[in-house]
Image: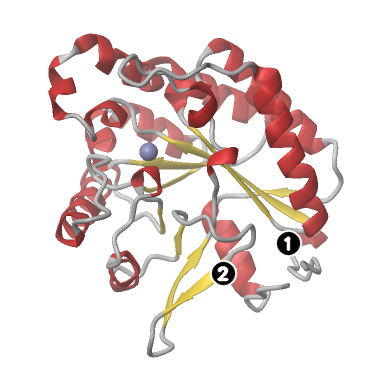
Amino acid sequence: MFDNSVKWPNGARCAVMLTFDFDAETLWTSRNEANWTRPGILSQGRYGAKVGVPKILDTLDEAGVPATFFIPGWTVENHSARCEAVLKAGHEVAHHSYSHRWVSDDPAAEVEEFEKGLEAFKTVLGVRPRGYRSPAGEVSAGLFKLLAEHNMLYNSSLMDDVMPYRHRFNDGAAGPVELPWHWSLDDAPYALFAVANPRPIFTNEHMFKVWTDEFREIYRWGGLFNIIFHPQITGRPSRIALLRELIAFIKTFPDVWFATGTDVAEAWIAAGEPEAR
Ligand SMILES: [Zn+2]
């Protein structure tokens, strides 16, 4: 049983992370490289950069809330103006591999993807991300050592909690802080459509219901509400309205703290790393 023992800043009861996985075209090429030659398919990803990110930045600005954008290195290199706009608006940018390749069975590829992605942030944006999220939640067994070697503050790839926790190695050494997520708090399962894998597109009402039901209970537990949006999905007109309505709903609750991944990880460490049950 959770006992709400995390002391979030300013006496907040619940931390809210609005996160945007800015995959752009890589969402469509990471599982099928042949898609690089299919302009129609790629255009779905490009929408996220062209229209989605500016609309999302406007919406966040109007609401006055911070966000974290997890960005593959390829997107940093190919949509650099949009990434710079994210930084200029005061949001956090975090690491999301290089090409969005799924590497669960290939630790060497994970290292390559990680280092190449880091280099893109340094070269193009002049920043060093402090957090990492794996593409589609797929990680190899070597990830946590890799993150520790690169001194990453946090990871947001696993689904085994609704509170932050600390990864520990067999020798007791500290790894990164985990900021867990879950598919239910992600726009993709409800609204990402692909002809090759057709699924129903859900209404805003359906998504709002699942997300606000999750929020109410996480708020009660005093946990971390860590939600994932994709600019190419949530950047659609009706979904921008959903984002605005979700933020407004959360704001009706007292003592909610909207924060970036780095802010949440640092606050949890400052609170003494409580893993309350
Ligand atoms: Zn992604």
Q: Residue at the spot x=27%, y=54% of the render? A: 104
Labels in figure, total = 2
| Residue 154 shown left or right of residue 265 in the figure | left
Report x, y in % for residue 237: 56, 11
Residue situated furthest bottom in the rendering: 171
**Which residue has dot 1 on it?**
9
Against 89, residue 132 (above or below) is: below
Q: Residues within 10 Å of mark 2 (few under 14, many from 20)?
A: many
- Callout 2 secondary element: strand
Could you say which quadrant of the image residue 82 lies in? top left
Report x, y in % for residue 200: 51, 17
Could you say which quadrant of the image residue 4 lies in? bottom right
Report x, y in % for residue 238: 60, 12
Report x, y in % for residue 55: 52, 19
Mark 2 and mark 1: Cα distance apart in space: 17 Å
Q: Quadrant of the C terminus?
A: bottom right
Tag of residue 165 = 2
Kindly indicate whether the residue at mark 1 contacts the one at mark 2 (C-beta within 8 angstroms). no
Front of the two marks 2 and 1: 2
Q: Amino acid at mark 1?
A: Pro
Work out whether mark 2 precedes mark 1 in sequence or the reverse, and give the earlier one.
1
Camera-nearest residue between 120 and 253:
253
Q: Residue at the spot x=23%, y=44% of the render? A: 98
| Residue 18 shown left or right of residue 13 in the figure | left
